[in-house]
Image: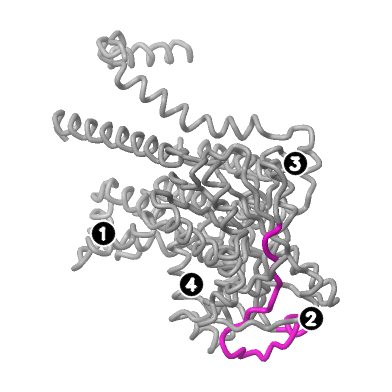
């Protein structure tokens, strides 16, 4: 390479680095509150919602409704396992709203003093056995999951769906050896959709959202392992007005309709 | 006597270096980014050490889960490296020594896993070797054997991601090697196989060793393809990076830091030992 070639390359690299830095700066601005007129009720700017993976479908819908009702607003989501979200919030992630799939992970956040007020329980969710369409292995209940040759995916104990699964299996006095422990409920479900496992313990809402690929088998022991979902506005919310408006929408009749249609139960 | 010889060597090397290069100042446009780059690479590691809960460290080390994951990581990375050596060295030789149509295309294909995000690699592996995959369905139907959720699956994922590193290193060594030795061997009647085993391989051994170390390090750190393709179960598919991820996702930051520190210490120690043994002698 000639000296000039090297110089051009170096200049290009510096330009790229600067552009990347500028882009970072921009995204920070977008995450900021923006012009907020709290009194009028109209909310603008970005609302950042950290929500349990099982809320993916319904919250995405509520987010669209929110944007339609508040022109100039934008809702961005971070869907993941609840404990991961709690850790991110406590480590200073710029979130406005936190919706957890279990009170335990909400408590992690409120105990660290990162919640604004007390959380509100907005829905409940129940486990079902997800199996491939038309249930090729003829699974009828939890006991069938212990049969040799049946491959089962569970969530890890640390995430709410895994904790609930453990509780349900203990209630049924069934011991199973899953082939994999997934980090959130959607990952467990996708193993069924891919056909890599024969069954997974997921929420009723997940099966409903994937009705074209999987069937849900209800089992009585799930009544002992019902998850309550709390939601809260975060203390360091960059867009407090937006956060409050979003939580209000989730708790409203309109929000409830979306959540019930997705298969959630009222608290 | 020894000292005199050494001084002589030093004197000679000083003569060999142009004096101007020593006295010239290091240009700031090079020095400052270099220091920033170094800090960028070192600071996160320092952060890991700073956040380590030293008080509870012995107790956490004793937790069996960490050692199980570490053992599995070391085993799978080593087996994956051996697989890569068996398949990758011949592939590198083919690319370096044999003229064939489409050689450039093949070389480009070999490097694809290098630029592919490992998660994509995992998805691709599932589509081929998964229970419903093109080859996987046949394996399942014929032998009743499936790769996902098995330790073999972990090795497959690691080998897929790590092999290009070995192939590129060995091919580079082969191209850099003096092929007159091989020609001499051929002139003396050695076939291609004999030439390969008796002349080429010893000649590029340091390059193969360097490639193997690189390959092993990449396999040890493999995460995306493993969790996507092989799943996550302690003792069977949960390697150290997966254990770190699960602990972190579970909200146990201290635990994740301890696991990271163990992996960092073990891999750096092994790489340093190998470096002394293999790389510097090259």
Q: Which residues are magenta?
A: A121-148
Q: Residues within 10 Å of mark 2 (few under 14, many from 20)?
A: few
Q: Are both tags, 1 and 3, on one chain?
A: no
**Would you say the residues marked 3 and 4 are in contact, meaning their CB atoms lie under 8 Å apart?**
no
- Residue indicated by mark 1: B97
What is the secondary structure assignment of the residue under circle 1?
helix
- Lower sequence index among marks 1 and 4: 1
**Relative horizontal placement of residue B200, taking residue A63 as reference (left or right):** left
Residue ranking furthest to the top? B23
Residue A7 painted magenta:
no
CA distance for labels 1 and 4 = 33 Å
Marked residue chain, label 2: A
**Relative horizontal placement of residue B16, taking residue A237 as reference (left or right):** left
What residue is rendered at 59% in x and 51% in y? Answer: B241
Q: Is residue A76 visible?
A: yes
**Relative horizontal placement of residue A174, taking residue B264 as reference (left or right):** right
Q: Are both tags, 1 and 4, on one chain?
A: yes
What residue is rendered at 60% in x and 60% in y? Answer: A252
CA distance for labels 1 and 3 = 65 Å
Counting from the top left corner in percent of width and height, residue A87 is at 64, 45
Q: Are both tags, 2 and 4, on one chain?
A: no
Q: Is B260 placed above or below B223 here?
A: above
Numbered mark located on residue B126 in the image: 4
Between label 1 and label 4, give the one nearer the viewer: 4
Residue A123 painted magenta:
yes
CA distance for labels 3 and 4 = 41 Å
Counting from the top left corner in percent of width and height, residue B217 is at 51, 48
What residue is rendered at 71% in x and 55% in y? Answer: B68
Between label 2 and label 4, give the one nearer the viewer: 2
Marked residue chain, label 3: A
């Amino acid at each position: 390479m000639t000296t000039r070639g090297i110089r051009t390359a170096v200049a290009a690299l510096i330009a790229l680095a600067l552009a990347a830095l500028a882009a970072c700066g921009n995204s920070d601005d977008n995450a900021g509150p923006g012009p907020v007129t709290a009194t009028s009720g109209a909310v603008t700017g970005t609302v950042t919602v950290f929500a349990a993976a099982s809320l993916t479908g319904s919250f995405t819908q509520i987010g669209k409704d929110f944007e339609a009702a508040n022109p100039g607003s934008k809702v961005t989501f971070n869907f993941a396992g609840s404990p991961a979200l709690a850790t991110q919030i406590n480590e200073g992630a710029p979130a406005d709203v936190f919706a957890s799939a279990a009170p335990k992970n909400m408590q992690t956040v409120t105990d660290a003093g990162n919640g604004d007020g007390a959380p509100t329980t907005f829905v409940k969710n129940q486990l079902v056995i997800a199996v491939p369409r038309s249930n090729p292995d003829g699974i009828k209940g939890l006991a069938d999951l212990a049969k040799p040759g049946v491959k089962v995916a569970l969530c890890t104990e640390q995430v709410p769906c895994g904790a609930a699964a453990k509780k349900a299996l203990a209630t049924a006095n069934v011991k199973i050896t899953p082939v994999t422990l997934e980090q959130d409920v959607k990952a467990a479900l996708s193993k069924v959709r891919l056909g890599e496992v024969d069954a997974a313990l997921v929420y009723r809402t997940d099966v409903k959202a994937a009705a074209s690929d999987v069937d849900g088998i209800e089992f009585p022991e799930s009544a002992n392992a019902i998850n309550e979902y709390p939601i809260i506005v975060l203390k360091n919310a960059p867009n407090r007005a937006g956060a409050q408006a979003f939580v209000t929408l989730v708790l409203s009749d309109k929000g409830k309709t979306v959540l019930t249609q997705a298969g959630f139960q009222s608290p | 006597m020894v000292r005199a010889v050494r001084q002589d060597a030093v004197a000679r090397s000083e003569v060999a270096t142009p004096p101007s290069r020593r006295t010239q100042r290091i240009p700031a446009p090079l020095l400052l980014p270099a220091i920033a780059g170094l800090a960028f690479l070192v600071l996160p590691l320092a952060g890991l050490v700073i956040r380590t809960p030293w008080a509870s460290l012995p107790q956490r080390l004793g937790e069996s889960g960490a050692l199980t994951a570490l053992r599995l990581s070391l085993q799978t990375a080593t087996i994956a490296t051996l697989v890569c050596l068996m398949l990758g060295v011949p592939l590198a030789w083919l690319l370096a020594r044999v003229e064939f149509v489409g050689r450039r295309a093949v070389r480009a294909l070999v490097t694809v896993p290098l630029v592919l995000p490992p998660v994509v690699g995992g998805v691709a592996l599932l589509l081929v070797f998964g229970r419903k995959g093109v080859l996987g369905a046949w394996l399942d139907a014929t032998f009743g054997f499936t790769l996902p959720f098995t330790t073999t699956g972990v090795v497959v994922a690691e080998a897929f991601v790590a092999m290009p590193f070995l192939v590129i290193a060995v091919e580079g060594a082969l191209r850099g090697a003096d092929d007159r030795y091989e020609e001499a061997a051929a002139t003396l009647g050695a076939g291609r196989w004999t030439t390969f085993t008796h002349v080429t391989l010893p000649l590029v051994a340091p390059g193969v060793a360097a490639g193997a170390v690189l390959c092993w390090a990449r396999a040890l750190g493999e995460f995306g393809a493993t969790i996507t393709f092989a799943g996550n179960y302690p003792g069977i598919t949960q390697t150290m990076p997966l254990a770190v991820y699960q602990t972190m996702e579970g909200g146990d930051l201290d635990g994740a830091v301890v696991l990271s520190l163990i992996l960092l210490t073990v891999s750096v120690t092994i790489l340093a030992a190998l470096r002394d043994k293999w790389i510097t002698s090259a």
